[in-house]
Image: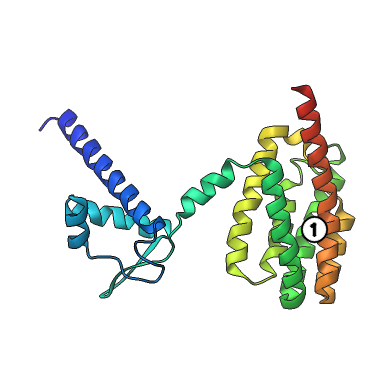
Amino acid sequence: MTSDGSSLHAAGRRSLVDTTIDQLREQLAGGAWPVGSQIPTEHELAERLQVGRNTVREAIRVLVHAGMLVSRQGEGTFVRSTSDPAAVLRGVQRSGIRDVLEVRAALETEAARLAALRHTPADVDRMRAALAREAEVIASHPERTGREATVEHDLEFHTAVVEAAHNPALTEVYRYFGASVRESMTTAFGDHDMPEVVVATHAALVDAIESGDPDRAEAACRALLAGPTAAVEQLLAAIAARK
């Protein structure tokens, strides 16, 4: 077979796998198999969907990787989730900056409450070290305060706060939203218009978490986020006015 023929065959097979993936996603979303239940065997699915077992196997592998299915050696394949995480993330990417920022704020305030209750001395040391690096960069580059010069250290600080909550699921969701906020704001505003970092409010959050008082930690987190949120609102208003 020529290389062109091989390419066409591969493309056709890929299309068939994609179609099978879509059909299985629809079955899962439609509740054909509840969460925790075992899906039919490869042979049964191949007969139902009128495709080969290898096609079904590849489709299942993709859905396992996506987190919708889980394979257990010697037992079979089971439903982990009826919603596709990839589709959820694509929806987030299509959301506006304000929407994503509000969700990130909700995650951070809950993380601050939990961090006040669950933090370790090492967690506090990590927050203070990140904040010290941030303050050092600000002092060294006053003309770039709070913008590209400090963004990495600022993200490091906020991630340390969230990880001090010791909730792996919260950490993973926050990592995604943190990156999304950064990307969205840079795209819309550019680094030169990023909200400035205020070290004092960050330090107050660490103090509140270290105190062990969840209400105080939540209030400190909201106070910290108030400035960036207001700055984003002003920038969005300015952009809307120019249209």
Residue 33: image location, x then y, percent: 35, 65
- Give me the residue at 16% from left, 52% from top: 52
Q: Is residue 178 above or below residue 212?
A: above
Q: Residue furthest left?
A: 1
- What is the total number of numbered labels drawn onto the structure image? 1
Front residue (pair 187, 56): 56
Q: Specify the quadrant of the image occupied by residue 242.
A: top right
User: Is residue 20 left or right of 163 when viewed as pictured?
Assistant: left
Percent of width and height locating residue 25: 37, 53
The colour style of the image is rainbow
When asked about the image quadrant of residue 118, the answer is bottom right
Residue 15 visible in the displayed image? yes
Few, some or many residues within 10 Å of mark 1 (<14, 14–19, 20+): many
Q: Quadrant of the C terminus?
A: top right
Look at 71% across and 66% down and name the residue there: 111
Q: Is residue 53 something one can see in this rendering?
A: no
Q: Residue furthest right?
A: 200
Q: Nearer the viewer, residue 203 or 177?
A: 177
Residue at coordinates 36% horizontally, 52% vertically from top-left? 26
Question: What residue does disc 1 label?
Answer: 131
Q: Position of residue 149 (x, y in %)?
A: 76, 42
| Image quadrant occupied by the N terminus | top left
**Seen in the image, is 71 located left or right of residue 8?**
right
User: Vertical placement of 52 versus 219: above or below?
Assistant: above
Q: Position of residue 170 (x, y in %)?
A: 62, 64
Judged left or right of residue 183, residue 199 is: right
Question: Helix or strand or loop: what does disc 1 sit on?
Answer: helix
Which amino acid is tagged 1? Answer: Leu
In this rendering, is residue 23 above or below 163? above
- Name the residue rendered at 62%, 63% in the picture: 171
